[in-house]
Amino acid sequence: MHFTIQREALLKPLQLVAGVVERRQTLPVLSNVLLVVQGQQLSLTGTDLEVELVGRVQLEEPAEPGEITVPARKLMDICKSLPNDALIDIKLDEQKIVVKAGRSRFTLSTLPANDFPTVEEGPGSLTCNLEQSRLRRLIERTSFAMAQQDVRYYLNGMLLEVSTDTLRAVATDGHRLAMCSMRADIGQADRHQVIVPRKGILELARLLTEPEGMVSIVLGQHHIRATTGEFTFTSKLVDGKFPDYERVLPKGGDKLVLGDRQALREAFSRTAILSNEKYRGIRLQLASGQLKIQANNPEQEEAEEEISVDYNGSALEIGFNVSYLLDVLGVMTTEQVRLILSDSNSSALLQEADNDDSAYVVMPMRL
């Protein structure tokens, strides 16, 4: 195996692939990246057994084929440290990889390619092609609500649901729920649901960088695979039953509040400064045409904001975790937002004022 490549051409896929590789590995080969040269193509593969990423680069000059695994982090650090315009020469020499660029020379240890685990391909049951920018928006609008290290392991990920011409993403940690849908050209009549683990979702979002580009998604029995011109990403699915999110969506809320998103976000941020650091609770007091936001903490400090809103229902007082409200307002993009409430013990539904493709549910707090 022997090839030469421009630093920039190697660094971009190497950084993406190294992102999948875990630093602390039980199997030494898992901290390596698999390099395969075939014809004029170099492919780089990283995996942690749950998620696998293959990056592809076209080589400008004919190369000597071969395959080997090398330490991912060290190879990436070497590439990063070389000058921008460096031409890198990589050669396999007696089970060591020799990396040369200008007057620099590095010799790295290797492990055989046969030791490298591959995520076995199951039959793909459903395929669709989506615009990268729209899929990325779907993930960004919902991923913040995924649980982290919850014992209910099926919450540590995102539900992707495919039904007639619609792809929907839902995430919840039990205290709040985020949901976003997009139109997609899917010839599928019945509902098909998969749960993608948290790491898989976050890695996938990192890869969707070409706004104009397309991505092909295959949903199999145990895996989801995403393919673009430059990479193939595979993630195992979470085996479990996601909660029935439609039962969580509040129905029949009779108190409709319309407010300026940016003004609300700033007022919540200021009030949050003096909320209890552990519980982050704030109190909302609704009256005709105005919303009063209050917070206090164990040190007897208090914050109060008043903000004008479009509301003409009866008075209501309700508590929330301010972080949850700020997360929602942070992913919305419209000027006006809509908040639907029923009473102080029921969840709130937040949506963009003129857009129904996303919905956010936040449970109230007792203060």
Image: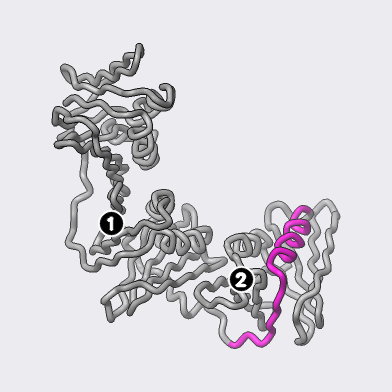
Q: Amino acid at mark 1?
A: Arg
Of 40 and 96, which appears nearest the observer? 40
Check disc 2 and give the amino acid type.
Answer: Met
The residue sitting at 14% across, 27% down in the picture is: 64
- Local crowd size for mark 2, using a 10 Å CA cut-off: few (<14), some (14–19), many (≥20): some
* Residue 226 location (% of width, % of height): 30, 56
Residue for point 14% across, 30% down: 66
* Residue at 57% over, 61% down: 331
Which portion, as a residue range, is magenta?
A: 252-273
**Marks 1/2: CA–CA distance:** 34 Å
- Residue at the spot of label 1: 225
Looking at the rendered image, the quarter that the C terminus falls into is bottom right
Can you see residue 115? no
Residue 33: x percent and y percent?
28, 34
Residue position for label 2: 363
| Mark 2 secondary-structure assignment | loop
Q: Earlier in the sequence, mark 1 or mark 2?
A: 1
Tell me: residue 244, above or below residue 141: below
Quarter-wise, where is residue 32 in the image? top left
**What kind of colouring is applied to the model shown?**
one colour
Quadrant (top left, top right, bottom left, bottom right) of the N terminus? top left
60 and 146: which one is in front?
A: 60
